[in-house]
Image: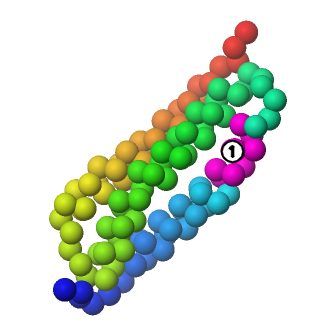
Amino acid sequence: MIGEINVYSLIGLIIRSIAIAIILFYIIPKQFKEVLRPRDWLTGLRWQMLLMFSFAILASVPSVVYQILRTIGVDAPVLRDISSVTGNLSFLAISLLLVMIYNYKRKE
């Protein structure tokens, strides 16, 4: 059932894990502190950023599980398909977040 270690999948898993750890343990706590600041014209953007980062982390879970299984040589076609969609949703969330940041206007 378990095959040999796929080195390229292992490298991908390590890179993805580092990226998720940065978002989960550095960016989200900092953003949570920003959300708790007194309300001003950026409060809405702060909440949107926190929600998008949280969504991106949740959407990346199937991809990480699939990457782990692929690393140890287990093929999971259904999980592969799910991780393909959710991985792209995660990337889309981060892209939309950047668009929102660059286009956020001060409310008068």
Which residue does the image show at 55% across and 68% down from the upper left? 18
Whole-percent x and y of residue 106?
Answer: 70, 18
Q: Is residue 83 left or right of residue 23?
A: left
- Assign a secondary structure to mark 1: helix
Vertical relation: 81 (above or below) 2 = above
Whole-percent x and y of residue 76?
Answer: 21, 69
| Residue furthest top as drawn | 108
Task: Give the main secondary structure, helix, strand or loop, of the magenta stretch.
Answer: helix
Out of 15 and 63, give the one closest to the viewer: 63
Q: Over which residues does the magenta segment extend?
A: 27-35
Which residue matches tag 1? 31
Residue 8 belongs to magenta span: no
Label 1 sits on what residue type? Gln
Which residue does the image show at 29% across and 75% down from the upper left? 70
Which residue does the image show at 67% across and 57% down from the upper left? 26
Q: Residue 46 falls in which quadrant of the image?
A: top right
Residue 33 belongs to magenta span: yes
